[in-house]
Amino acid sequence: MVCSIDPVLQTYGYTCKQDVLDDSIEYWNPDKTQFWIDDGIDLVMGERHGYTFSDVDGHELIDVHLNGGTFNLGHRNPEVIAALSDALESVDIGNHHFPAPGRAALAKKLIELTPGAMSKVVFGSGGGEVVDVAIKSARYATGKRKIVSIEKAFHGHTGLAINTGDERFLKMFNCDEPDEFIHVPFNDLSAMEAALADDDVAAVIMETIPATYGFPMPNPGYLSAVKDLCTAHGALYIADEVQTGLGRTRDLWCLQHHDVEPDILVTSKGLSGGIYPISAVILNEKAAGWLSEDGFAHMSTFGGSELGCKVALKVLEITMRAETRQHVAELEEFFKKRFAAIQEEYPDTLLDVRQDGTIAGLVFAGEDAAVRVSKMLYDRGVWAIFATLDKSVLQFKAGILMPLEQANVVMDTIREVTGILDAQRRMAVA
């Protein structure tokens, strides 16, 4: 058995990677662990910094998955760590029942940075939790129960959030409730209008660009038209900006360049800086009404911890800096040119590039082609994951501080892998 002296292993009392894999199968998640082993990606994350991390066996990878945007500012960002360390000098998670400077300051900042007449913020520790709060808030505000979401959507796996997602995640837990949760095709305005026609829908919830579906881009005017339909039929518009928000598409929130002012906005993942879990749902006055009636109606022990608030405030500060926003614009143009060149060189293999800012869905020929691409990239030192609900699409999620030199290495590797895939496809056809 080959063993390692990686400090991450030692932190938890392990000396061998295989022991971690064995215990993960035995005590944690056998199916997921075995899936990656069978795919040749027996990854156990070891040391990490910036946009790179190493397997505990020493295999180094540039990260353009970022755990869905959690590491938008990089792994172990020193400014974010410093913010947490500073907070630990005086506070802990705090008590969720009482006002706290951190919660007050972060709530105020989020309202200032979010379009529309936003009024209140409710905090959680993860995305699914605040999606649940968003749905409950919409039901309170409208007195209705039905929720409309997009087919192949993903908004989390908690109690209410899971019902807005794909049936793959519903039937196993007997969570499919077709009378209350309606799913319509993305970019199909007629289907959305039909779903709202009876004026019995509490809210429409949408990722601005559906990530787990492979980042299909909204048609021009689609999102604003959906918002108009919501207004006309007495439903609220919930914007899920967990994966598309926090500066990844130039604006702080992706919906800002789609001319949409949501009634409710959800953020998580990157708000944590990858350092301390925190999430938030931002509500307009109508959706926030329950907070004035019964502020004890929703509780979250770890939601909006004082430590997490300090981290999130630093994340927002870094994200909103002029130099950060300029760098995102430079990365967007760089990726756009490189993707276009690869697609021009291999048009029958890289079929489409769905890009906005530093995120993209790369559509490859073959229904599971992105699974193969993910493995080929992994072998060559780049980590990007396929879209769970469309395995022809590779999710590309570069961080907003990624150096251009590192971005160039990533794009060179994607070009190399696309060329290999193209050659394999041609040989199979010949």
Image (tube, rainbow, N blue to C red):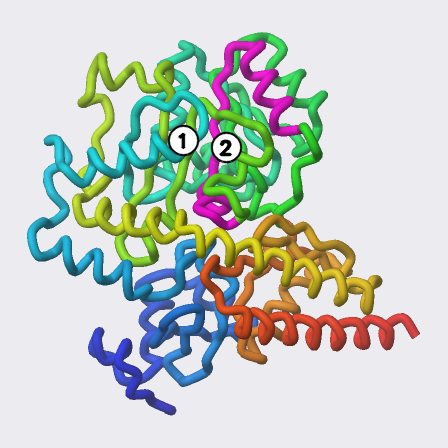
Q: Is residue 303 shown in magenta? A: no
Q: Amino acid at mark 2?
A: Thr
Labelled disc at residue 160? 1
| Residue 48, percent from left and from top | 36, 73
Q: Amino acid at mark 1?
A: Leu
Q: Quadrant of the C terminus?
A: bottom right
Q: Which residues are magenta?
A: 222-248
Name above or below for residue 394 compared with residue 153: below
| Residue 101, percent from left and from top | 14, 37
The number of numbered badges drawn on the structure is: 2
Say which quarter of the image contains residue 377. bottom right
Left or right, 207 with respect to 5, comes to right
Which residue ends up furthest to the left in the rendered image?
90
Which residue ends up furthest to the right in the rendered image?
430
Determine which residue is flagged by label 2.
164
| Residue at (56% x, 48% y) in the render | 212
| Residue at (72% x, 21% y) in the render | 190
Within 10 angstroms of label 1, few (less than 14), some, or many (20 or more) residues? many
Name above or below for residue 197 compared with residue 278: above
Q: Is residue 237 shown in magenta? A: yes
The reply to whether the C-beta atoms of the residues labelled 2 and 1 are less than 8 Å apart is yes
